[in-house]
Amino acid sequence: RLAVLAVAQGVTVAAGGRIRQAARLLASCLTTFRLARDDRAEADAHHLLAVCAIADDDPAVARSHAEQGLYMARRAENPRLICLNLAALGTVLAGMGSADDGIACCADALAMARDLGEPACEEMVRRALAQARIAGDPHAAFWGWRSRAADGTFPAEHAGPAPPLPSA
C-alpha cells in the first residue's frame, strides 16, 4: 500500500518516462496484491495504472486497467474505488469516441462521490467528467484516440463509435 501511495504522489507530477516508471512499479505491486488477495489494494493499483496509461496516451491499457479496477473495487465493496475507477473508465470511453457512455460513467461516479462526502474524491471525479465532456466535443483535440480509431492506426475493437472528423 505504501508503494501505491508513493506512486500516486509521483504520478501527479510525473511526465513522460516517469509515468512509465511509476506504471512499472505499480504493475509489479499487482502480483503481490493478488497473492495477498487484497482486492482493495489491487483496485487502487488498477486505478492508478489507468491514470498512468491515460497520461501516457495508451487508451487500450487505460481501459483494461479501469475495467479491472472497477471489478476489483466492486469485489472489495469499496465505494470510493468504485467511484474512481468508474470515472477513469468514463474518461477513457469518451476519449475513444463513446462520449455519451463516458460522460454517463463520470456522471454516475460524481453522484457516488457526492454521497461519499469526500471532497478530494469528488474533485477528482469532477476533473474526469470535465475531460470526458471535452473528449465528447468532436472539435476538441483530445489525446488523438478518436482520430487514430477513425484512420485505422488504433485497433477498432478498442474504440467506441467515432464521430466524423471535421473537414479542414
Image (cartoon, helix red, strand yellow):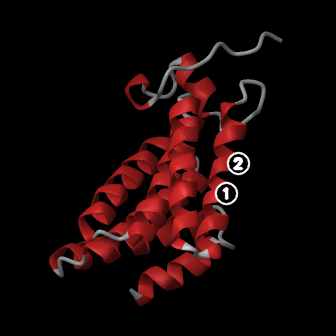
User: Which type of secondary structure does the marked residue at label 1 adopt?
Assistant: helix
Judge whether 25 appears above or below 112 on screen. below
Assess whether mark 2 and mark 1 are in contact (beta carbons under 8 angstroms): yes
Quote the CA–CA distance across marks 1 and 2: 6 Å
**Nearest the camera: 92 or 90?**
90
* Residue 113 percent coordinates (x, y): 55, 64
- Horizontal relation, residue 79 to residue 104: left or right: left
Q: How many marks?
A: 2
Q: Residues within 10 Å of mark 1 (few under 14, many from 20)?
A: some
Among all residues in the image, which is located at the extreme bottom?
Answer: 2
* Residue lying at 67% horizontally and 36% vertically, measured from the top left: 135
Which x, y percent locates residue 163? 61, 17
Residue at x-position 20% and y-position 73%: 34
Q: Residue furthest top?
A: 167
* Vertical placement of residue 3 versus 74, above or below: below
Residue 60 in sight here: yes
- In front here: 143 or 68? 68
Q: The disc labelled 2 sits on which kind of residue?
A: Ala
Q: Quadrant of residue 132?
A: top right
Mark 2 lies on a secondary structure that is: helix
Which mark is drawn over residue 165? none
Identify the residue at image location x=58%, y=76%: 118
Across and down, in percent, residue 62 comes to 46, 50
User: Which residue carries the number 2 mark?
Assistant: 130
- Side (left or right) of 116 relative to 119: left
Q: Which residue is mark 1?
A: 126
